[in-house]
Image (cartoon, rainbow, N blue to C red):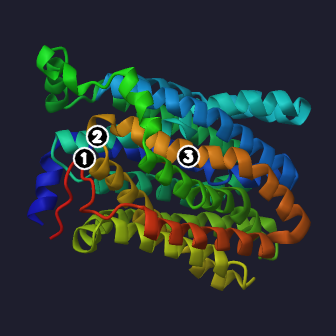
Amino acid sequence: MSKLKKAFKNQSYLQSSVTLMLFFASWGVWWSFFQLWLTTPKSGLGLSGSQVGTVFSVNSLVTLILMFIYGAVQDKLVIKRSLLVFASVIATLIGPFFIYVYGPLLRSQFNIGILVGAVVLSAGYLSAVGIFEAVSERFSRLFDFEYGQARAWGSFGYAIVALLAGFLFVINPNLNFWAGSFFGLCLLLNVLFWKPKAEREAIAKMSDASTESTVPSLGEMFSLLKLKQLWVVIVFIMFTWTFYNVFDQQMFPGFYTNLFSSQEVGQQVYGTLNSVQVFCEAAMLGVVPLIMRKIGVKKTLLIGVTIMCLRIGLCSVTTSPVAVSMIKMLHALEVPMFILPMFRYFTLHFDTKLSATLYMIGFQIAAQVGQVILSTPLGILRDNVGFTMTFRIISLIVLVSGIFAAFLLKNDDQDVLGDPFIRQ
């Protein structure tokens, strides 16, 4: 309880928490139903599985390019919020963009639409999420708070809007997009005007020669690509988190809503279930750091991969809405037990002043490269063999990748080049 009181007295913790909550609210209110909007003929665009795969693939291609740029720029900015402001402006305009630009272009000029959409969605959300998370993680180390607890507020924001999104989508999907703009405007005002005293003082000191060495050079950033261990992480991410994202974003919403008597019923239940799941995920983001301190970073990560494999595989053996709903709840354990130890792995085994670039290259960009390569083929595979076989193939690949990680990822006490990890 004393730690909780201390956290709520920390203005940097509060500001980071609100920032993440508003960002994920602005994103989640439309993103949670994005695949359904693309595929549903009645309330969306009615695209095929291969077309949806192409949309996700092009999104990922543009995202990975912007992620490298974002990561390099943010490591130069250190804790300045220029990129956060830029992304927040795009989030503020997301409603008009979807309604008056993106949707009409996908209907009339599909190829132009996917390119324009990929640039806007990546700049505002798909690439920006890594920067919001990396900046908050850096704040947590500079201003003495637990990153996982701040990130939990992001999931909390997503959970609230996921509950709202299902009902809005059934009424009119445009309401989801307008809600995204509303939360985007709140986010923009937050990052522009709420700057805690500790942050202002730290930014003022950044101009001093004594702190110049903490800013990485471009040479240091590009030299990361020569690190063998980084490539091990990249391969691991591509064959775990990438496949999971294709499953969860591109396939699961359509699979789940088709289990019900009508798509409208399925969409409402999906929104409610998604909200409950993310509420539980937010709670686990506060608990997982405690688990990680007991069993270590690598073991926590491997547990997360195991849960990921089980969740995907179990969806291939049942079509019961109740059973699939229970399986969906594993997401609340899996995401925190994958993302938090992965972030800590970077700050443990690599130079912490390059943490934003490392996170963008090793985690976010690696995942996007995988989606560029895999989204369309997996969409075609789903069209041809159905959900069941596709889920089994994805689950098997994740299992093999988990075994790969068990042998090739470093233990917590090996090559500690960043912040040491102390178990309690």
Identity of the amino acid at label 1?
Leu
Q: Which residue is drawn at 8% across and 63% down?
A: 2
Q: In this view, does 230 lie above or below 333?
A: above
Q: Are marks 2 and 1 in contact (CB under 8 Å)?
A: yes
From the viewer's perspective, is 242 left or right of 386?
Answer: left
Numbered mark located on residue 417 in the image: 1
Q: Nearer the viewer, mark 3 or mark 1?
A: 1
Q: Which of marks 2 and 1 is nearer the N terminus?
A: 2
Q: Which of marks 2 and 3 is nearer the N terminus?
A: 2
Q: Earlier in the sequence, mark 3 or mark 1?
A: 3
Q: Residue 355, percent across and down?
A: 34, 39
Taking depth in this image into account, of 215 and 109 the one nearest to the observer is 215
Local SS, label 1 = loop
Q: Local crowd at mark 2 within 10 Å, few (<14), some, or many (≥20)?
A: some
Alpha carbon separation for disc pair 2 and 1: 6 Å
Q: In this view, does 344 lie above or below 307?
A: above
Numbered mark located on residue 351 in the image: 2
Disc 3 designates what residue?
Answer: 366
Which image quadrant for residue 100? top right
Identity of the amino acid at label 2?
Asp
